[in-house]
Amino acid sequence: MHTETLALAPPAPGHHPTLTVHRFGPPGGRPKVTIQAALHADEVPGLLVAQQLRRQLQALEDAGQLLGEVQLVPYANPLGLAQHPLGQHQGRFDLGDGLNFNRFHPDLAAAAGDLLQGQLGADAQANVRLIRAALRQAARQLHSLGTAQDLKHKLVGLAIDSDIVLDLHCDSQAVMHLYALTPHAEQASALGALLGAQAVLLATESGDSPFDEACSRPWLLLAERFAPLPVPPACFSVTVELRGEADTSHALAQQDAAAIIAFLRHQGAVAGPAAALPRALCQPTPLAGSEPLTAPCAGVIVFHREPGDRIAAGEAVADVVDVDTGEIHTLRAQSAGLLYARIATRWATPGKRLCKIAGTTLARTGKLLSS
Ligand SMILES: [Zn+2]
């Protein structure tokens, strides 16, 4: 293991935040894998999984079994780790500008495309090499205004030429679930089967450039721009939601890290025969079919159903109790599907998304993720 410390743009005199990267395996080895934990800094199960991965990757490196280079960012958001206004950890939004740490990551497709003008040809693998070099160059040319933007630029710069990117998050109260691009359904299904995911949500664009899509979508955009020349979707990038924020246990972390290593073996980054995939607990479904149930007014939330429950269309999932009138507003699912996540607090504000159901009958448009 080789550890690198990257300096982030200082937010103020006397403050010098840094980003730590552990590297394993042969430098330049393919497939190149980037794994980062807790970009939303208060989503800590990923931090624990990263510690397990560090041990397991070190053992594989010692045994000479790493074929690909693996970069592990054990805490992707040192800024958010230090945000505790009034004693409450706030790791989702930058307190400086209110922006979500997992939105507005740089879209390098246009800049890389300009660098590639006239260079691509009929050889898909040669195109992949040229595109990776152009994406790296475009990342190097990014100009950062502020520490949080510098963090986003550095994270994307690290991951942009990877074959595989795993961004480890969690939801509030949830079962294991994944977000990935639609063209990567097969890899997402394989990873989901190994992790025991109960929902795998696919889209070609979720909106506002989350980190995973900043790495994977340029390939779709460049394929469009340079059609009919062959540009495969050569970066499988996935957001792994490691259940709920309170689901920290050594056993789960060990199990999740082992599943990730099994996936890396399946993808050829780790030597040795890949075991057969376990039976998947779900089929991928469109993110556009994921149904958020929204509070109609302020009030106390009473859930009738838990994460992991199958919901029938029309079924009551939660009540919101109006404390002025005493009225009980019952929220019902429009679509059948699996309840995969719900909020952890029990006070609703008007319009608050209370839970999410992975269905197949809705076709939402616009921004598909919560803010
Ligand atoms: Zn998150």
Image: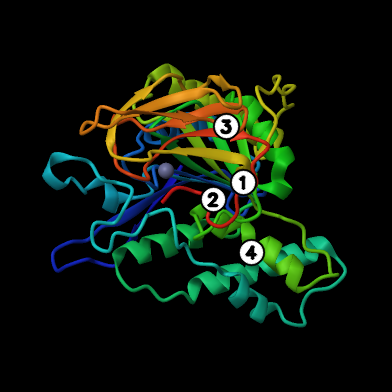
Query: Alpha-carbon neighbours of circle 4 within 10 Å: few (<14), some, or many (≥20)?
Result: many
Q: Closer to the N terminus: mark 1 or mark 3?
A: 3
- Give how far apart the Cα atoms at labels 4 and 1 are: 21 Å
* Above or below for 116 versus 310: below
Q: Position of residue 341 (x, y in %)?
A: 46, 31
| Disc 4 target residue | 218
- Give how far apart the Cα atoms at labels 3 and 2 are: 26 Å
Q: Closer to the N terminus: mark 3 or mark 2?
A: 3
Q: Is residue 314 left or right of residue 221?
A: left
Q: Position of residue 346 (x, y in %)?
A: 29, 29
Q: Closer to the N terminus: mark 4 or mark 2?
A: 4
* Above or below for 231 versus 2: below
| Disc 1 target residue | 288
Residue 336 is labelled as: none
Mark 2 near mark 1, Cβ–Cβ under 8 Å?
yes
Mark 3 near mark 2, Cβ–Cβ under 8 Å?
no
Q: From the viewer's perspective, is the residue at label 4 or at label 2 nearer? A: 2
Q: From the viewer's perspective, is the residue at label 4 or at label 1 nearer? A: 1
Badge 1 amino acid: Ala
